[in-house]
């Protein structure tokens, strides 16, 4: 699995940049994002910049990576995933049931399988 690492551009040299991140300095390929100004933040996968991000997003990703490291070490992670705490999980918009226009939902939209578990979008109205 490849995890994106936020890195800050220190120097830009056309198609590559010298950037600093969690694991120190790296030469980062900029072919997918183009030349970037010094102090830009990039989301980097395997020494290739995949996305230009802002400083706030870089900090959120860095905090999540720290939380993952803490969880792997057996340390409690309460408060480290603040954007996920205190709310119910939601399906991404493209996986949510779609309305047919007549108020009903197609059969395929009524049930979802996530991680081997079956979820019904309207269990109260289900006749199964």
Image (spheres, rainbow, N blue to C red):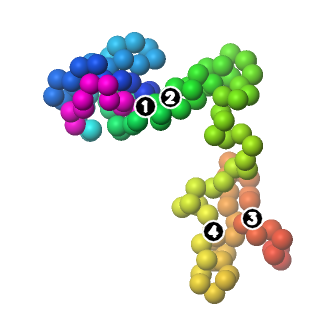
The magenta stretch is 34-43
**Circle 1 is placed at which residue position?**
55
Q: Residue at x 36, y 31 (%)?
A: 42
- Residue 64, magenta (yes or no): no
Q: Earlier in the sequence, mark 4 or mark 3?
A: 4
Question: Of the numbered discs in the image, which one, if any, rests on residue 120?
Answer: 3
Label 3 and label 2: CA atoms lie apart by 36 Å
Q: Residue at x 59, y 81 (%)?
A: 100
Q: Earlier in the sequence, mark 3 or mark 2?
A: 2
**Circle 2 is placed at which residue position?**
59
**Mark nearer the viewer, 2 or 4:** 2
**Circle 4 is placed at which residue position?**
97
Q: Earlier in the sequence, mark 3 or mark 1?
A: 1
Q: Residue at x 67, y 41 (%)?
A: 84
Q: Earlier in the sequence, mark 2 or mark 4?
A: 2
- Residue 41, magenta (yes or no): yes
Q: Earlier in the sequence, mark 4 or mark 1?
A: 1
Label 4 and label 3: CA atoms lie apart by 10 Å
Q: Residue 80 location in percent, x, y? A: 66, 28
Secondary structure mostly seen in the magenta stretch: loop
């Amino acid at each position: 699995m490849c995890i994106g690492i936020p890195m800050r551009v220190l120097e830009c040299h056309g198609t590559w940049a010298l950037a600093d991140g969690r694991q120190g300095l790296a030469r980062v390929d900029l072919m997918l994002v183009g030349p970037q100004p010094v102090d830009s933040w990039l989301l980097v996968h395997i020494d290739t910049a995949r996305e230009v991000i802002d400083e706030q997003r870089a900090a959120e990703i860095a905090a999540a990576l720290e939380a993952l490291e803490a969880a792997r070490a057996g340390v409690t992670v309460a408060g480290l995933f603040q954007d996920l705490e205190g709310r119910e999980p939601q399906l991404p918009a493209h996986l949510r049931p779609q309305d047919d226009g007549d108020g009903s939902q197609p059969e395929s939209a009524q049930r979802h399988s996530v991680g081997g578990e079956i979820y019904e979008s309207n269990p109260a109205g289900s006749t199964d």
